[in-house]
Structures are given as structure tokens and as C-alpha cells.
Image: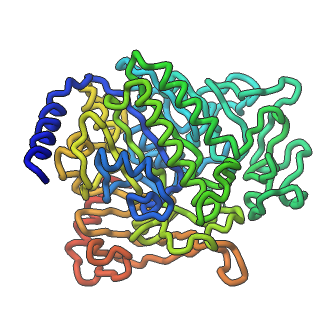
Amino acid sequence: MSMQKISILTMAAALAALTVVAEKPNIVFIYGDDIGYGDFSCYGGEVDTANIDTLAEEGVRFTGGYCTAATCTPSRYSLLTGEYAFRNTAAKILPGNAPLIIDPARPTIAAFLRDHGYATALSGKWHLGLGSAAEPLDWNGQITPGPKEVGFDYSFHMAATADRVPSVYIKNGRVVNLDATDPIQVNYQEMVGNDPTGISHPHLLKLQADEQHGKTIVNGVSRIGYMTGGHAARFRDEDMADTYLNKAVDFIKANQDSPFFLYFAPNENHVPRVVHERFQGSTSLGPRGDALAVFDWCVGRLVQTLKETGQYENTLIVITSDNGPVLFDGYWEAGIERQGTHDASGPWRGGKYSRWEGGTRVPFIVTWPGRSRPGISDAIVSQVDLYASVAGLVGKPMPENAGQDGQNLLATFLGETLDGREYVIQEALTQLAVRKGNWKYVPPGSVTERLGIMTWKTGSGWKETPVPEPGLLFHLSEDPAEERNLAALYPNRIKEMQDIIMQVAPE
Ligand code: NG6
Ligand code: CA
């Protein structure tokens, strides 16, 4: 490099350091669904995710970033509340008609930011329940409590997942495009109305599904659960990414004069992977790869909007995922057949549902273009830390009754230090594990994996690995695949890890 170039770089760095940074940068969480550690190209994935990779280059890309659980609801719960989800027994994969599992009296990160002058919005997946447990929810009236009651001024979302009814959008507590003469009813136990189901009318399906996903057909896709009514309100999966994206873009544009918090939670990469026609076949990996391309495209559009409105430099962007990857999750989408050499969980074992690393170690990128010190960080960080770190950023104490499991890792997230957490607790289907430094401990119980399609060859499509006393111990840097159990060699290490779990999760 020439001297001239060095001095220009030095000057640029000096100027950057002098940049007057607003006290309250915008905050954007881009929360992928079922996107694995190895899915983005900056993590070695085979689908070109150029927009994400650019953000990773400008910010900090973590190799030890975790969601708190290997399924959606608990991870989302922790992200928003700052509390490990195992503390809330209701934080399990919820049906579409479950009541809200966040106590509105306990301020979420959205409520906290709203109370400190931020405009707040949710666009995308919710899956944290709606309505109160006391009375059954009426989908045809005001749906409350929901996102608004826990801090989102604006919300545009589906109730649970795209594979669960009701297959409609809800905007600020009302089903969008609902025709009052065609009221919605939802039932997860028995059929309501007479809409065809995947089991009774398989010829109407554009995507074959397993029995669990074989209930009411919406848009040629059978779902988990039954619904009737709301025909004009039902979504078309192909348009879902654009729909959520456009709401997010509008929100960014509308809030150029006030700091905002955007929780953008697209369906990608969750099933059913029915992407817009223009993305179908855009990758060699089948619908799962196409959905990754959609996700990256959404990131690009959000960045473009931030740049066009002059807010990019003043926005903290977090990109991560709610749990590890799954290739087959109920629909015949050729995820397994088309994966080729792409490894969705990267070097880690297992994926969604699993206590192996691949269940909760996820892509994790934090960029604040005006501020980050770019680099790759091996620090251990968890999504449960984002709340405390954001509180540190805005310089306000977290409310006392907010979740207290997070740590203020702002300096880590901004790349100012390589120190992170000492240890992190991992959850999969309510069973726990702990990683400390290079060590990973899996207490007795079992480890679940979603292997593939249910066939005469694979049996149920699920694998349960029993974990005997005293549990499993792995050295992750020497054995990332968690294959060599060192428990018998290091009883003291096991004791140390057990003590951590006892201390954090005494039950
Ligand atoms: C499981 C579903 C799966 C998916 C998951 C939730 C079955 C057999 N499988 O119960 O398809 O919907 O729940 O995914 O029903 S999550 O990412 O929202 O946690
Ligand atoms: Ca998920």
C-alpha cells in the first residue's frame, strides 16, 4: 500500500472517530427464521448473499453468536424480553391461537425504546401469542393484547408461522382485508367450517405435506390447524416477503425525523418456502436456497432505503436467526435432495430443535456503519444480550422488572473489544446445555434432531440421541462436530458446567 493511501485511510479513520454520533441511532433487527450458521455466503454458504456480506464487512461478524433456543418462540421471547425463555414455561412452539406469553407489565426492548422516544414497529412473524388466556380470542374484532401492548406502536404481522393458521395478516390488532360477512374461526383440535384440507383434498395442493401440516388449505398449501372464513384476508405466500418488506420500508421513510426501532422478521427461511415467482429457481438449492436469496434481497432493500433517506450511517443493524437450519420441516420442498454441498449449519452438528451447536449457534452480524470497528469476532454473544446492550447504547438503565439475563455487550457488538460472555446457556425443546470458552456440556436427557423426511427408511424422520449420566462434554475448537465425549476425562470440568446451569437455572 502506498504512503498516500495509508494517510488517506488514517485521515478517514480520524474523521470517523470525530463523527458526531447521535445519542439515539435507529435500531433495526433483521431476524431470520431457521437460517443456519452456514447459510450466508460470508459464513461459507453457497447462495450469494452479497447484501448481507457487505454489512458484515462494514460491521462485526460473530462466529460465537447464539439465539437462546433451537426453536422460534423461545428465542423471540428472549430477544424481546432480555430473559432466558426457560424461565417462562409457556415459551414453547405456540399454535396460532395461543395467548400472548409476554406479560405486558414487563417492558420489552420495544417498550423500553418507545419510552425513550423511539418510534417502534414490528413487520413480519410474531409467534409469541395473541389475546389473553382468560377468554378465547375473537379474530374478527380488536386482537389484544398483542404487539402494541408490549411496545410496538405499529405492527403488521402474522399470528404465528406461515405453516400455521390463521393465514392472514394482522395490522395494529385487526385482520387485514377481513370481510365482516365471512368471519374467521380457528381451531387446532377439530375441523371448523368446510374448507378443504390437505388430507381430504391432496389434489388441490401445490406442495405436498406431512399429516401435521395437512389441515386447512390456504393458497394451495395445507397448514397446521383448521380455519374457516376470512377468505378475502388470506395471504398469498409468494407475496409475503414483499408485503413485510414494504411495510418496513414505509416505516423507515415515515420516521426520518425521529429515532426508530424496527423489528423486521420475515418468514424466510421457514416452511412453507413458497417464494415469489421472480425468485423461484433463482438458486441451485431449490426453494430453501431461493428463500435465502429473498432474505438477502430484503436486506438490500432495507439498506437502500436507509441510504436514500440519509439514515444509514446512523442506524445499528443486527442480522441474526431464531434457530438453526432445518432442511425438511413438513413440506416436500426438495430441501434435502437439492442441498448439494451446501452445509446450512456450517461446521456445527445438528440444527433446529437440537442441543448440538447447530441448533443455537447462528449467523450474527452487527453493523453500525458510522461507528462499528469492522472485523470478525469470536466472542460469545447471545441475542438475550441485545436488550441490555441497547439500553447501554441509549444510556438508560433497563427497567428493573425487565428480563435480567442479558449483559451489556455494546463494546463487543461494536467491535471495540473481543471479550464477550464467559458462558452461554443453550436451550432445545426445554433441555439445556452450556458453552464456556471452548467447552460445551450437554446434561443428561436426550438430543433431538430433525433428520429428514418420514419414510420407511428413516423411520419418523426424527433422531433422539439419549444422553446418559453425567452428560456429554466436548472441546469445540478441537471437535466442532461434537463427536468425542470427554466427560469421563474431566469430572471437574463437568462439575463446573453443572454448577453454572444450577446457578442460572436452579429448577
Ligand atoms: C413444529 C412443526 C414445524 C415448524 C415448527 C415451528 C410439526 C411436525 N413440525 O412443530 O413444521 O412449524 O413447529 O418452527 O408440526 S419455529 O421456527 O416457528 O419454531
Ligand atoms: Ca424458527
Colour scheme employed for the rendering of this structure: rainbow
Residue 244 quadrant: top right
At x 40%, y 55%, the residue is 363
Q: Is residue 227 visible?
A: yes
At x 59%, y 46%, the residue is 267
Residue 1 quadrant: bottom left
Q: Residue furthest top?
A: 257
Residue 275 coordinates in the image, percent (x, y):
66, 50
- Ligand 1 position by quadrant: bottom right
At x 37%, y 26%, the residue is 311
Q: Quadrant of the C terminus?
A: bottom left
Residue 406 coordinates in the image, percent (x, y):
31, 43
At x 61%, y 42%, the residue is 241
Q: Is residue 471 visible?
A: no
Q: Going by the image, does 349 lie left or right of 475?
A: right
Residue 470 quadrant: bottom left
Considering only vertical position in the picture, is 311 above or below 473?
above
Between 150 and 413, the one nearer to me in the picture? 413
Between 419 and 205, the one nearer to me in the picture? 205
Residue 263 coordinates in the image, percent (x, y):
48, 35
Residue 149 coordinates in the image, percent (x, y):
53, 25
Considering only vertical position in the picture, is 252 above or below 6?
above
Label count reads 0
Between 102 and 75, the one nearer to me in the picture? 75
